[in-house]
Amino acid sequence: MKKITILISGRGSNMQAIIRNIQSGILKEICTIQSVFSNKKNAAGLHKASKLGIPTHVIASKGIKRKIYNALLLDWLKNENPDFIVLAGYMKILSPEIIQEFPKKIINIHPADTSLHQGLHGYDWAFENKLKTTKVTVHYVDEGLDTGKVIGKKEVDISDCKTIEDVEQKGLKIEHKFYSECLKKIFEDK
Ligand code: GRF
């Protein structure tokens, strides 16, 4: 069984979906979760993780130099020694040192097709470009911004969405299911 650590910065809805799948869904007996990490002490996801019985850890990135923060995070991750690091709305860029320490072991979900849109605000981008369909991408994390090898992409029909919020809601619904499906595939090494 693979051991994972999830990194978040905010709401943690993907984290919650993954934990539920580990506890009683498609990831049961496939992986275990040892901890949830946040760089923000007030991240709503921390509370959700605790309610689900998962240990949490915070290193607040605010107010400390990026280099120091990343060194602390690297130390903590080395100590946790997870098989995979799962990013779920983690809003900081991981340092090259962290990425090199865990090659092909860090996975992210991006709310757009990574070949069409990188960086923040993927759903706003889809809405503003009046797309009828958009995609979410699960990918390995490398040293670039959303440039890592793609694990899977899933289409989201947004043709009936009237607002950015509608787009996000539809996208997240797909993310919550699709992320765990991709993790299952990776962890089973299929
Ligand atoms: C999701 O849209 C995810 O694709 C992106 O950040 C958002 C995180 O949402 N990377 P949540 O914290 O999982 O609710």
Image (cartoon, rainbow, N blue to C red):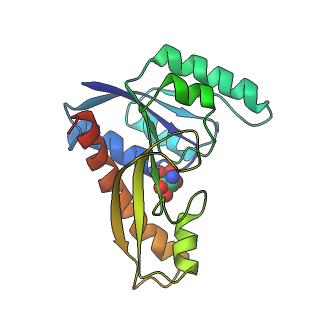
Q: Is 148 left or right of 42, judged from the image as shown?
A: left
Q: Residue at point 25% right, 41% down?
A: 184
Q: Residue at point 23% right, 35% down?
A: 189
Q: Is 97 left or right of 89, judged from the image as shown?
A: right
Q: Position of residue 99 (x, y in %)?
A: 54, 30
Q: Is residue 131 visible?
A: yes
Of residues 87 and 99, the one nearer the viewer is 99
Marks counted in the figure total 0
Q: Quadrant of the C terminus?
A: top left
Q: Quadrant of the N terminus?
A: top left
Of residues 42 and 164, the one nearer the viewer is 164
Relative to residue 135, is residue 44 depicted above or below? above
Q: Position of residue 31 (x, y in %)?
A: 27, 30
Q: Residue at point 45% right, 42% down?
A: 48
Relative to residue 130, is residue 19 depicted above or below? above
The image quarter in which residue 169 lies: bottom left
Q: Position of residue 63 (x, y in %)?
A: 80, 34
Q: Is residue 57 visible?
A: no
Relative to residue 120, is residue 55 depicted above or below? above
Residue most extreme to the top:
79
Q: Is 7 left or right of 151, judged from the image as shown?
A: right
Q: Is 42 left or right of 23, judged from the image as shown?
A: right
Q: Position of residue 52 (x, y in %)?
A: 37, 36
Q: Residue at point 64% right, 28% down?
A: 59
